[in-house]
């Protein structure tokens, strides 16, 4: 029997993977991998988010979508009560800042990708591959060799999900390599899990909340970005691709040496 791992990963994205029609205001695709220790996720993370929902909405069925919160869609307009809305945002930021988890993020600059490659790779597949490479590093450091780790993705559509499953299989089961760095994905057993878009998944909501702030920081790193400041210390790796230089990889590894030990 396969031994279950001590961690679970939730994945979400910001932007789209279309390289033919690129939005000049947001010409990137961001994918975030949020890695939680299962005990901490069960006993700390989930209760904290549920408690916030019950406090402000009277129940825990509200789904925290970054776009809905930003655009003040129901129920996040709080009937025009700015004080209540600001209080909610402040507490949400405090919870995200305090809960223990590790972030691996990948930013694909679609404009650069299209200009540097005659046949650009699928940004989603690139993000998946680069993210799994760093996750593999995290889990081997966390002594998860030979253990099964679930990776939870939100369903995007039948065709998209099939394409993702094929790419996931090529990487994790066939150990297909990309670039100069050889990674042995077989050392950790990765399980692909799809969650319905309507599912009220705490982990997916957190992944959704942090993806766009990472993208905005890439586009304008000097601009004030409170949401990014809240999560920046949790980022183990933030890969940007492609680069202006010929180097294949650009990894910003968090300088906090205790990041892996603390999550």
Image (spheres, rainbow, N blue to C red):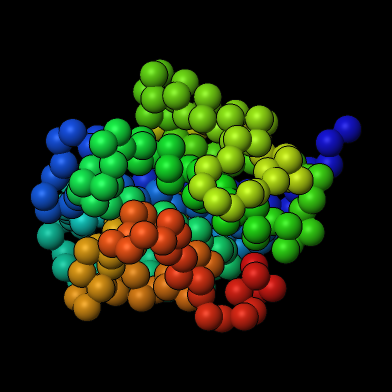
Instruction: Please give left or right for residue 122 compared with residue 131 in the image.
Output: left
- Residue placed furthest toward the right: 1
Residue 22 is left or right of residue 182, and the answer is left
Residue 138, visible in the rendered structure: yes
Q: Position of residue 20 (x, y in %)?
A: 18, 33
Question: Relative to residue 187, is residue 213 drawn left or right?
Answer: left
Give the residue at the far front of this rendering: 246
Q: Is residue 92 above or below residue 144?
A: below
The N terminus, quarter of image: top right
The residue at 60%/35% (across/down) is: 176
* Closest to the observer, 103 or 41: 103
Residue 42 seen from this side: no
Q: Which residue shows up at 37% across the image and 46% down it?
A: 13
Image quarter hosting the C terminus: bottom right
Q: Residue at x 18, y 52 (%)?
A: 26
* Res. 158 image quadrant: top left
Depth check, front residue: 216 or 239: 239
Residue 233 placement (x, y as % from top left) = 48, 75
Q: How many marks?
A: 0
Q: Residue at x 73, y 57 (%)?
A: 140
Up the image or down, 242 lies above or below 232; here it is above
144 is higher (above) or lower (below) than 213: above
| Snapshot quadrant of residue 252 | bottom left
> Residue 245 is drawn in which quadrant?
bottom left
Q: Position of residue 47 (x, y in %)?
A: 56, 58
Q: Is residue 234 above or below residue 202?
A: below
Q: Where's residue 10, x and y in %?
A: 52, 47
């Amino acid at each position: 029997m396969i031994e279950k791992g001590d961690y679970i990963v939730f994945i979400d994205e910001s932007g789209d993977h279309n390289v033919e029609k690129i939005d000049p205001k947001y010409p990137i695709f961001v994918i975030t991998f949020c890695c939680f220790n299962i005990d901490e996720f069960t006993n700390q993370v989930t209760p904290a988010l549920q408690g916030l929902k019950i406090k402000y909405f009277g129940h825990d069925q509200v789904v925290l979508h970054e776009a809905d919160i930003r655009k003040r869609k129901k129920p996040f307009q709080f009937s025009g009560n700015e004080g209540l809305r600001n209080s909610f945002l402040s507490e949400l930021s405090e919870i995200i800042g305090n809960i223990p988890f590790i972030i691996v993020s990948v930013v694909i600059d679609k404009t650069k990708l299209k200009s540097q490659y005659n046949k650009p790779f699928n940004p989603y597949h690139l993000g998946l591959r680069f993210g799994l490479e760093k996750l593999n590093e995290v889990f081997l450091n966390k002594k998860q060799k030979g253990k099964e780790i679930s990776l939870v993705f939100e369903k995007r559509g039948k065709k998209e999900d099939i394409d993702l499953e094929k790419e996931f299989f090529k990487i994790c089961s066939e150990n297909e390599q990309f670039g100069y760095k050889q990674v042995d994905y077989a050392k950790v057993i990765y399980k692909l899990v799809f969650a319905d878009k309507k599912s009220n998944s705490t982990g997916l909501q957190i992944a959704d909340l942090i993806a766009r702030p990472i993208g905005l920081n890439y586009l304008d790193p000097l601009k004030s970005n409170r949401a990014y400041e809240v999560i920046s210390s949790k980022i183990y790796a933030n890969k940007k691709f492609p680069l202006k230089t010929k180097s294949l990889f650009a990894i910003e590894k968090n300088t906090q040496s205790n990041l892996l030990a603390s999550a």
